Image: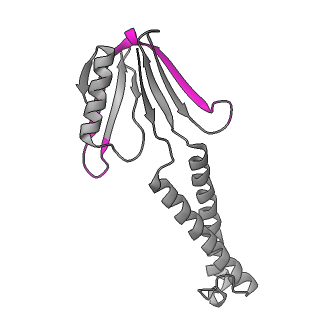
């Protein structure tokens, strides 16, 4: 019997929104800085040629370059779907496989393998407030805690509880809270 859960990576609406916004803002700042340097209006809906290159134009070019770099980085994390993967609990083989995708290279796929008999409990960590966290961990007998849920926007409390209970029932362990 196999229980498998899939983890959503960086391909979320909020990431698409921020990657686009930051990239477009960065391009706008670079074009404003270049317009002030060359005295050619590169942005049709504004008048950046009225800016002095020193200090406004050079600062806008600098911040625009940083914005373009961050925007490209965000788009690459979306393209590569960083953080996606799955948790597989296999009773037939007695193994647990946790796989996540990372950045390209020799460590692109991050795979963790454990024995089911090494699991002590399923741990639920809930922290409410300004920066809420709702996560599920697999707690091993050697006190290592392995996160099983995605990073980012917290899942609804009922989903976290149901998922933790399902995993605990499947593995035959208890659910703890932290």
Q: Residue furthest right?
A: 38
Residue appearing at x 59%, y 57% in the figure: 70
Q: Is residue 156 left or right of residue 39?
A: left
Image coordinates for residue 154, horizontal then vertical, percent: 34, 44
Q: Is residue 141 visible?
A: no
Q: Is residue 15 left or right of residue 63?
A: left
Q: Is residue 115 magenta?
A: yes
Image coordinates for residue 85, horizontal then vertical, percent: 51, 33
Residue appearing at x 67%, y 76% in the figure: 31
Q: Is residue 52 visible?
A: yes
Q: Residue furthest front?
A: 1
**Residue 88 found in image quarter:** top left
- Residues in magenta, as a range: 105-133
Image coordinates for residue 157, horizontal then vertical, percent: 25, 40
Image coordinates for residue 87, horizontal then vertical, percent: 45, 26
Q: How many marks?
A: 0
User: For this rendering, which residue is in front, 101 or 88?
Assistant: 88
**Which color scheme did the rendering employ for the protein?**
one colour
**Residue 123 found in image quarter:** top left
Q: Is residue 90 magenta?
A: no
Q: Is residue 117 left or right of residue 93?
A: left
Residue appearing at x 51%, y 46% in the figure: 10
User: For this rendering, which residue is in front, 141 or 175?
Assistant: 175
**Residue 171 found in image quarter:** top left
Q: Is residue 115 left or right of residue 159?
A: right
Quarter of the rendering occupied by the C terminus: top left
In this view, 48 is above or below 92: below
Residue appearing at x 62%, y 39% in the figure: 103
Quarter of the rendering occupied by the N terminus: top left
In this view, 131 is above or below 139: below
């Amino acid at each position: 019997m196999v229980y498998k859960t899939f983890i959503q990576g960086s391909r979320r609406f909020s990431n698409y929104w921020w990657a686009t916004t930051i990239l477009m803002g960065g391009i706008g700042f670079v074009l404003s800085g270049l317009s002030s340097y060359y005295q050619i209006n590169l942005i049709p809906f504004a008048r950046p040629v009225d800016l002095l290159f020193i200090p406004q134009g050079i600062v806008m070019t600098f911040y625009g370059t940083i914005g373009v770099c961050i925007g490209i980085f965000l788009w690459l994390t979306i393209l590569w779907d960083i953080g996606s993967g799955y948790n597989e609990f296999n009773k037939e083989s007695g193994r647990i496989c946790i796989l996540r995708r990372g950045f390209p290279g020799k460590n692109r796929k991050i795979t963790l393998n454990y024995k089911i008999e090494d699991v002590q409990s399923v741990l639920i960590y809930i922290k409410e407030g300004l920066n809420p966290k709702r996560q599920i961990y697999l707690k091993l007998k050697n006190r290592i805690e392995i996160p099983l849920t995605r990073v980012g926007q917290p899942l609804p409390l009922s989903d976290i509880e149901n998922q933790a209970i399902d995993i605990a029932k499947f593995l035959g362990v208890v659910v703890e809270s932290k």
